[in-house]
Amino acid sequence: MLWLLDQGIPRNAAVLLSERGFDAIHVGEVGMASASDPEIIRLAEKEDRVIVTMDADFHAILARSGLQKPSVIRLREEGLKAKEVHDIVLLIHSRFAGSLAADCIVTATNLKACIRMLPIKS
C-alpha cells in the first residue's frame, strides 16, 4: 500500500512506515507542503496513494465531489508523535486493507475507526 502523509502529520511517520516496507511519503518531501487539499487529492489519486491527515476537509471534498478515490484516513487525535501515527496507520491497515484498496474514508479516534466506502452517496 502506498501512503501520502499530509502536512499536519509528523514527517518521521513516513520514515517509520518506510522502514516497515511501505512506500510512504510526506507532502513536505515532494514540494507540496503548502499545496491545497484538491492538489493533494489529485496526487494521491494519480499515484494510487492513501492520504493520512488530521484535516476533516478531505472527507468533505470527497463527499461533495462524488469522487471514487483516493482513500483517506483522518486521525482525530491532536499532538500525535510519529511512532503513534505509525502504530495507528498499521492498525488501520491490518483491519481495513481490503477497503482501503477499494477506496474508502476512515476516521480514527482513540483507536476506534469508522469507515465509509467511496463514493459517498447522499
Image: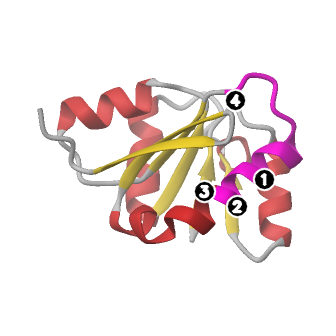
Image spot of residue 45 (x, y percent): 38, 57
Q: Is there CB contact under 8 Å for labels 2 and 3?
A: yes
Report if residue 98 lies within the magenta region.
Answer: no
Say which quadrant the C terminus sits in: top left
Q: Which residue is mark 1?
A: 86
- Cα separation, mark 1 vs mark 4, equals 14 Å
The residue under the point 24% across, 53% down is 68
From the viewer's perspective, tell me whether residue 73 is left or right of residue 84. left
Badge 3: few (under 14), some or many (20 or more) residues near its Cα, within 10 Å? Answer: some
For marks 1 and 3 on the same chain, the one whose residue lies earlier in the sequence? 1
Q: Are marks 1 and 2 in contact (CB under 8 Å)?
A: yes
Instruction: Name the residue beneath numbered marker 3.
Output: 92
Q: Measure the C-alpha gap from mark 1 to mark 2.
A: 6 Å
Helix or strand or loop: what does disc 1 sit on?
helix
- SS at mark 3? helix
The kind of residue on which mark 4 rests is Gly
Q: Which residues are magenta?
A: 77-91
Residue for point 81% across, 50% down: 13
Q: Nearer the viewer, mark 1 or mark 3?
A: 3
Residue extending farthest to the bottom is 21
Q: Where's residue 27, x and y in %?
A: 65, 44
Amino acid type at mark 3: Ile
What's the mark number on residue 56?
A: none
- Which numbered tag is attached to residue 8? 4
Q: Is residue 47 above or below residue 27?
A: below
Residue underneath mark 2: 90
Q: How far separated are the C-alphas under marks 1 and 3?
A: 10 Å
Q: Is residue 43 left or right of residue 6?
A: left
Between residue 96 and residue 38, name the one nearer to us. 96
Residue at the image position 42 percent from the left and 32 percent from the top: 58
